[in-house]
Amino acid sequence: MPFAVYVLGVAVFAISTSEFMLSGLVPAIATDLVVSIPDAGMLTSAFAIGMVVGGPPLAVLTMRWERRRALGAFLVVFAVVHVVGALSSDYAVLMVTRVLGALACAGFWAVAAVAAISMAGENAKARAMSVVVGGTTLACVAGVPGGAFLGQHLGWRAAFWAVAVLSALSVIAVLATLPKSAPEPVGRIELRPLFSKPLLVAYALNALVQGATFCTFTYLAPLVTEVAGLGEGWVPGTLVLFGLGAFIGITVGGRIADARPMTVLGAGMVALALGWAVLALTAGNPVVAVGLVFLQGLLAFGIAPVLTSRVFYLAGFAPTLAGGFSTAAFNVGNTVGPWFGGLAIDAGLGFRAPVWVSAAMMILALGVFALGRTKSTKKVRGGVDPRPARSTH
């Protein structure tokens, strides 16, 4: 795997730390800005909304850009908005910085995904994406719990300052290591193939699986302290366990996903659905709950390489634009997951409720998966997968 692909993974570590670190900062932000915990949790959804809105149009825009400079520019914007967020004392201003940061993040992902798979080669797309998305798992292992640690000892603003510094360093690394690339040839953009049934299923599965994951992950801190009965000092450690599971999952998943994608995806989703249901039932037992947090992180990110790479296999004719829609789908899940979890908490159902929502979303994902497999079986000759017939994607 080219070294530059790993550099992209490091940059993803910086942006993913920001995207997900609020799971450990929600109580502190709510107290400091005098808002409810669900309102503070909506800052995560705001970030996801910005990526949903920005993903496809920025994918079109960046098709004409030289990739290295585009990636550097998006990271500069990302660093600046975090400086503004760290200096803000107003909830509305912080909300705006989250949306603007998300737009920069969406642009970065649209370029980075295509850059990674183009450098990795035709038959290693899932492995390349496992390296890039692996930056997200490292964020869960080190960045997110590190942000929670900073939030507890130096205030939540310190975590925002840390992300700004990481983003600035990532600018230097990207500009120094990525090769120059010519802009993609852009003719008339045809959207219909990007909404074929196989791709729609891929988008839907991405949204549902991520929604289920981050529904619980966003409210993990109150689940640990209020339901499992552990002290606040356990929150960073629990986040680390989730991240370790995610890192192991994506490492293993990335190595086998290109060969057995449907097996990995189907078995992983069944296990995830069962795991969320068991966690909801046993969250009051701290030992079982902490162990399941690790397991769910492993399973959720173990199928991530299939979810991300499958779109590129199905849409080889328009990778950047398809990647933009995939990014949007991912963040539709990141939006509705925490939102549904917050609604369940506001309804007085307690902090176990988001876990039940996660289980329900996975059951729906399994239904979509089964429907997609049935349709693809009935219409074998109608697929859009451009790869050789031996492929199981």
Image (spheres, helix red, strand yellow):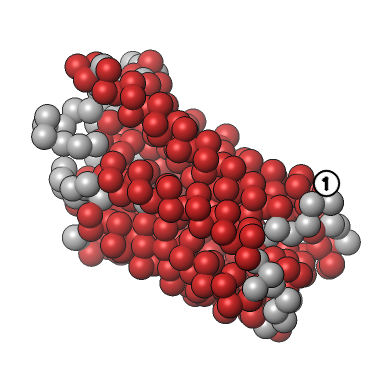
Instruction: Look at the picture and state if 352 lies above or below 92.
Output: below
Where residue 295 sits in the image (x, y, percent)?
Answer: 46, 65
In the picture, residue 20 is in which quadrant? bottom right
Residue, x 52% and y 40% (percent of image)? 363
Where residue 348 sits in the image (x, y, percent)?
Answer: 84, 51
Q: Is residue 328 left or right of residue 319?
A: right
Q: Nearer the viewer, residue 293 or 339?
A: 293
Residue, x 84% and y 67% (percent of image)? 31
Q: Is residue 136 visible?
A: yes
In the picture, residue 63 is in which quadrant? top left
Q: Nearer the viewer, residue 205 or 62?
A: 205
Q: Is residue 13 visible?
A: no
Instruction: Look at the picture and state if 350 lies above or below 391.
Output: below
Instruction: Look at the picture and state if 74 lies above or below 366.
Output: below
Q: What crowding class fits label 1: few (fewer than 14 Cα within 10 Å), some (14-19), or many (20 or more)?
A: few
Quadrant including the N terminus: bottom left
Q: Is residue 349 left or right of residue 79?
A: right
Q: Is residue 221 left or right of residue 195?
A: right
Number of numbered markers = 1
Residue, x 54% and y 67% (percent of image)? 293
The amino acid beneath tag 1 is: Ala
Residue, x 64% and y 47% (percent of image)? 357
Where residue 268 sits in the image (x, y, percent)?
Answer: 38, 51
Give the structural element (helix, strand or loop) at label 1: loop
Q: Which residue is mark 1?
A: 347
Quadrant including the C terminus: top left
Where residue 64 sits in the image (x, y, percent)?
Answer: 35, 33
